[in-house]
Image (cartoon, coloured by chain):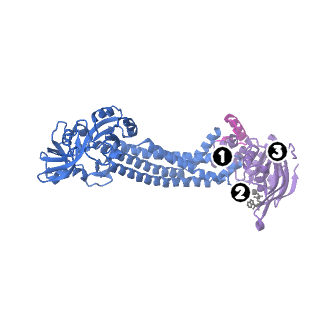
């Protein structure tokens, strides 16, 4: 044990002896790690925010849908008995709220023309709190629970149909039995999400009206969306929710209901990881170089130690310890700098407008998002990055220690 | 085996050759040698005569080309590298020409190094090391690093390191070659005194005539072979 302390002392002093070089390699790997940590956690924060906004506006972190709905969306593929299911799922402690959506297609008509629209029957009281549509009303107001025959439409649609707030429009569609249904609505609000697809296609009406025109009963909806307090609980809650599935209600995660966004996040995160990984590897080369150099230039010293009778394994441990501390300081440096930065951005946020120029809104796969980004530090990312750097540094020392046994002591000491 | 209780080193027809063919160098050529406990023996001879090589094969830092070497009756030429390391740790004290202290350790820690490797408890080590440093007149330098010491002081620390662990023999390869003559003389005096008073066996190489005068026995090497073996007094 005491021998081990002496080895620690030797290792630390040897690092201290080449202060400049130790500093350079610690900061090189530390900066690499810091940058990777910062951008990966920022990425995670951005993805989490994208996801959060999207699931709140759409079908939730996961939803119940008719098993066949995903493949061929149609109004007659609905979840029945949603009220009981809703109560059951709302009882789970991880659930923040539930939302019902009736989703169908139709045609909107005015004196100036007609165009196809996606009709969303929503619960105004809930959407008002959670949906970005409610936040992005530019004219008029969003729907209320008490509203009847009120509709909110996107600004592009409004322009195309030349309608203003307060004007009348007709929605026409086929109900679940295939019969034609028409209903008169008054435009209550116009929203501008910034995404052309939504602004020119989506309309929202109170769910009661939607049920009426599609001939659905009070106990039916296209989606029963579930919003979680913490998105990370998804897998856990999915397991619990499994028992509430029926032959008209199957579970769909947000990744299934929002495949474009999910793909975007997956590929973007993937390329971010590859990029940061490459950078870390480059920085690790600096440290590898340091480890090799410092071993190579001390051949004489090692020979002295071996001549004095130091067991080879102790010399090996000494070198591994040097790498251990070098890696530790590098990881600590990276953790403090990168983690600190990320933490700041997690708490205070960071406006992407400072870095990128946007025309209008920030749009990703048809969804519009806030430009204020927050990092999301997770144990996993911190552990994998810092631990990975630390461990790789230690592993690097295995190269020079292989050479120790081949040192021609007598020749070196001549 | 002729395990004489007092014979600590024995070489039999020990040879160490370097290179081959045209460039073959017979650095040590057919050396038969016995060193007994309590000796204070110098290996003399001009540069290149094989002094270092002879010491190196005795300590197992280098392998013989042929012949046998015994330490305390055991044939060390059969030893594995691990056993040789252990032999050096337990039985041999080293003093090098260029001191070879570990630069990151203080004088005290350098002197303590071998005791630490041997696993001696801290308090015993402290007493032992301080006693030795004191004996060598460098107790006040205990906390200094080698770079803060003069050559003579460094070599005393090296001697302290070599003798602190009570080795069977101290091997010293030209221990005074890097010291001025005055420092060299006092260092040799000190080694002689340690030999006299503590009975520590010394085998060292040197070609400094003044130092050879202090030696009880002088082996003269010429082209790797022992050409003379004089016993003084
Ligand atoms: N590793 C080696 N490779 C080749 N020749 C060597 C080596 N070591 C020593 N020699 C040669 O062996 C001879 C004896 O050298 P050495 O033992 O160092 O002599 P000394 O210590 O008496 O000066 C010299 O000719 C030297 O050049
Ligand atoms: Mg020599």
Chain under disc 3: B
Q: Same subunit under labels 3 and 1?
A: no
**Chain letter, colour blue:** A
Q: Nearer the viewer, mark 1 or mark 2?
A: 1
Q: Is residue A401 magenta?
A: no
First-in-chain label (1 vs 2) = 1
Q: Pick the residue in front: B72 or B100.
A: B72
Chain under disc 2: A
- Work out whether residue A16 can be spotted: no
**Residue corresponding to mark 2:** A411
**Chain letter, colour purple:** B
SS for dot 1: helix
Point out residue A229 in the picture as x, y percentages from the top left corner: 34, 37
SS for dot 3: loop
Count of marks, rendered view: 3
Mark 3 nearby-residue class (10 Å; few <14, some 14–19, many ≥20)? some
Write down the quadrant of residue A133 in the picture. Answer: top left
Looking at the image, residue A202 sits to the left or right of residue B230; the answer is: left
Looking at the image, residue A221 sits to the left or right of residue A396; the answer is: left
Point out residue A272 in the picture as x, y percentages from the top left corner: 41, 52
Is the stretch drawn in magenta largely helix, strand or loop? Answer: helix
Q: Nearer the viewer, mark 3 or mark 1?
A: 1
What's the distance in space between the residues labelled 3 and 1, CA to CA? Answer: 26 Å
| Beta carbon of the mark 2 residue lies under 8 A of ligand 1 | yes
Mark 2 nearby-residue class (10 Å; few <14, some 14–19, many ≥20)? few
Locate ligand 1 by image quadrant.
Answer: bottom right
Q: Same subunit under labels 2 and 3?
A: no
**Residue corresponding to mark 3:** B72
């Amino acid at each position: 044990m005491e021998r081990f302390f002496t080895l620690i002392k030797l290792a630390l002093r040897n690092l201290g002896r080449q202060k400049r070089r130790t500093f350079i390699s610690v900061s090189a790997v530390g900066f690499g790690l810091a940058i990777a940590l910062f951008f990966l956690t920022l990425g995670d924060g951005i993805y989490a925010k994208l996801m959060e906004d999207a699931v709140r506006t759409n079908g939730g972190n996961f939803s119940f849908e008719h098993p066949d709905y995903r493949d061929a969306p149609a109004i007659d593929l609905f979840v029945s008995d949603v009220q009981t299911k809703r109560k059951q799922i709302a009882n789970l402690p991880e659930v923040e709220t539930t939302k019902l959506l009736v989703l169908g297609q139709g045609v909107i008509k005015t004196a100036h023309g007609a165009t196809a629209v996606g009709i969303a029957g929503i619960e105004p009281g809930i959407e008002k709190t959670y949906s970005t549509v409610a936040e992005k009303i530019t004219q008029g107001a969003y729907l209320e629970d008490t509203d009847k025959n009120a509709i909110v439409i996107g600004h592009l649609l409004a322009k195309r149909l030349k309608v203003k707030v307060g004007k009348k429009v007709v929605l026409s569609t086929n109900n679940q039995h295939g019969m034609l249904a028409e209903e008169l609505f008054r435009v209550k609000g116009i929203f501008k999400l910034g995404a052309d697809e939504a602004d020119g296609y989506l309309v929202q009406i109170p769910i009661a009206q939607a049920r009426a025109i599609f001939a659905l009963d009070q106990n039916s909806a296209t989606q029963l969306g579930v919003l979680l307090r913490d998105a990370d609980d998804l897998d856990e809650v999915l397991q619990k929710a499994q028992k509430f599935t029926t032959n008209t209600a199957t579970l769909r995660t947000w990744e299934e209901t929002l495949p474009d966004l999910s793909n975007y996040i997956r590929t973007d995160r993937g390329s971010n990881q590859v990029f940061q990984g490459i950078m870390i590897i480059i920085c690790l080369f600096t440290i590898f170089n340091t480890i090799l150099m410092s071993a190579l230039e001390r051949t004489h010293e090692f020979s002295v130690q071996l001549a004095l009778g130091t067991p080879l394994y102790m010399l090996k441990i000494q070198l591994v310890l040097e790498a251990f501390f070098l890696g530790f300081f590098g990881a600590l440096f990276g953790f403090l700098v990168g983690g600190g930065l990320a933490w700041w951005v997690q708490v205070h946020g960071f406006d992407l407008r400072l870095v990128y120029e946007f025309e209008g809104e920030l749009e990703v796969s048809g969804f519009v998002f806030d430009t204020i980004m927050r990092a999301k530090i997770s144990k996993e990312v911190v552990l994998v990055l810092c631990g990975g750097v630390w461990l790789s540094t230690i592993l690097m020392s295995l190269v020079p220690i292989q050479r120790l046994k081949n040192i021609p002591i007598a020749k070196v000491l001549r | 085996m002729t395990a004489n209780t007092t014979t600590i080193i024995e070489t039999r027809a020990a040879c160490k050759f370097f290179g081959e063919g045209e460039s073959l160098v017979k650095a040590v050529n057919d050396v038969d040698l016995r060193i007994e406990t309590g000796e204070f023996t110098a290996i003399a001879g001009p540069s290149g005569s094989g002094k270092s090589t002879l010491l190196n094969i005795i300590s197992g830092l280098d392998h013989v080309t042929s012949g046998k070497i015994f330490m305390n009756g055991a044939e060390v030429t059969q030893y594995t590298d691990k056993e040789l390391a252990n032999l050096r740790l337990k039985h041999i004290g080293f003093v090098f020409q260029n001191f070879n202290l570990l630069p990151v350790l203080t004088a005290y820690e350098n002197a303590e190094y071998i005791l630490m490797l041997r696993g001696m408890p801290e308090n015993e080590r402290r007493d032992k090391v301080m006693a030795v440093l004191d004996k060598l007149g460098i107790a006040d330098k205990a906390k200094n690093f080698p770079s803060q010491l003069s050559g003579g002081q460094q070599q005393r620390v090296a001697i302290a390191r070599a003798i602190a662990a009570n080795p069977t023999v101290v091997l010293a390869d030209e221990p005074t070659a890097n010291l001025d003559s005055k420092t060299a003389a006092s260092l040799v005096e000190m080694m002689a005194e340690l030999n006299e008073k503590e009975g520590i066996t010394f085998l060292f190489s040197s070609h400094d005539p003044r130092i050879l005068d202090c030696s009880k026995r002088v082996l003269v090497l010429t082209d790797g072979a022992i050409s003379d073996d004089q016993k003084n007094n």
